Image (cartoon, rainbow, N blue to C red):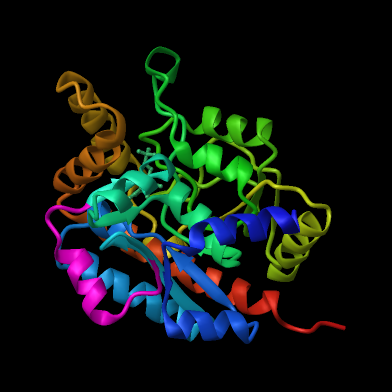
Amino acid sequence: MCSRFFGQKRAFSKFLQISPLVKEALANGEGVVALESTVITHGLPYPHNLSTARSLEQKVRSAGSHPATIALFDGKIHVGLNEEQLEQLASSEKAVKVSTRDIAKTLIRKEVGGTTVASTMKIANACGIHVFATGGIGGVHRGADQTFDISADLQALSKTPVCVVCSGVKSILDIPKTVEYLETHSVNCVVYGNENVFPSFFTRKSGSRAQFSTENLNEVVDLLKTSRILGLPYGTILACPIPEKYAGDGDVIQNSIDQAVREAQERNIASQSVTPFILARVNELTKGASMATNIALLENNASIAGRLAAKMHEKRP
Ligand code: PSU
């Protein structure tokens, strides 16, 4: 496990550009939270993407940890962005979506790239960052029995010992199959709350159960540390239902999602373009309500991740 970690760090080091603040926080053993950037480049429109990127970093800081937003540009993997870099990323019209497969190609072409959950996990792990916050992970797409469309996020979760704090997966995906896949691939799947029901992104509940639920972040810290001690290479999902007061009107959002999924099929939109298309279309159909909900849950997850990362370094009796 250890040699694997150092091996990966060495392999990435030629391309890693870790910001001085993140470097110092890691060296001092302080909490660091990785933040993905596909949500900036493809998930939210400008300028909401920029204000959200800033507010997520602020939520992590207020919770006692350091943010490390991850993105690719100029042939480097940047971990921790300054204000100018955030602005550049948010306003780039040429940014590509970078899953694990695309890291090398984006580096050699020196493209601007927003990292998905999968690639952000790999990069975070190579830097020794164990906690990562996002909105939703990719999963098994509806109709995957025909299309084979399964997000590389699930593979990364099965092979990368990083904790992803998220609100589950959107019901644009097949939630029961996604949860089943996670179980098959030994990914810890914990609901943060008092009820063991896997959340459904915009709404608090799907019909699926997770591995267990807990209201105690110290228990999550123990789970992560014990998994590491055991040398288990799998990731962990900490699924956080959106706070009640922000939860969307489930029926309205569900109808919009169903319509957007139908339109994506009719227009033959496939592969990496499916999620961005559906997100944008659902936002149009809900007249912006889905974006406000999306931002609220992103911020909530960043706060929880900030608290979790800080607790990873707390001394307990
Ligand atoms: N879910 C969202 N918003 C997003 C994504 C997922 O609600 O922006 C992004 C994440 O970066 C996730 C990626 O890792 O989409 C998954 O894409 P794909 O299904 O192409 O692997």
Is 85 in the magenta? yes
Q: At 45% across and 85% down in the image, what residue appears?
A: 21
Q: Nearer the viewer, residue 183 or 122?
A: 122
Quadrant in the rendering for residue 180: top right
Residue 156 appears in the picture as rendered: yes
Q: Note whether 186 is above or below 224 in the view shown.
A: above
Quadrant in the rendering for residue 194: bottom right
Q: At 27% across and 62% down in the image, what residue appears?
A: 73
Ligand 1 quadrant in view: top left
Pinpoint residue 14: horizontal percent, then vertical percent: 45, 63
Is 130 in the magenta? no
Residue 166 appears in the picture as rendered: no
Q: Nearer the viewer, residue 23 or 107?
A: 107
Magenta residues span: 78-95
Q: Nearer the viewer, residue 208 or 183?
A: 183
Q: Nearer the viewer, residue 167 or 234?
A: 234
Horizontal side of 290 relative to 195 (left or right) equals left
Q: Note whether 19 is above or below 44 in the view shown.
A: below
Q: At 44% across and 58% down in the image, what residue appears?
A: 134
Image quadrant containing the C terminus: bottom right
Q: Note whether 215 is above or below 136 in the view shown.
A: below
Pinpoint residue 63: horizontal percent, then vertical percent: 52, 82
Pinpoint residue 234: horizontal percent, then vertical percent: 67, 46
Pinpoint residue 279: horizontal percent, then vertical percent: 25, 44
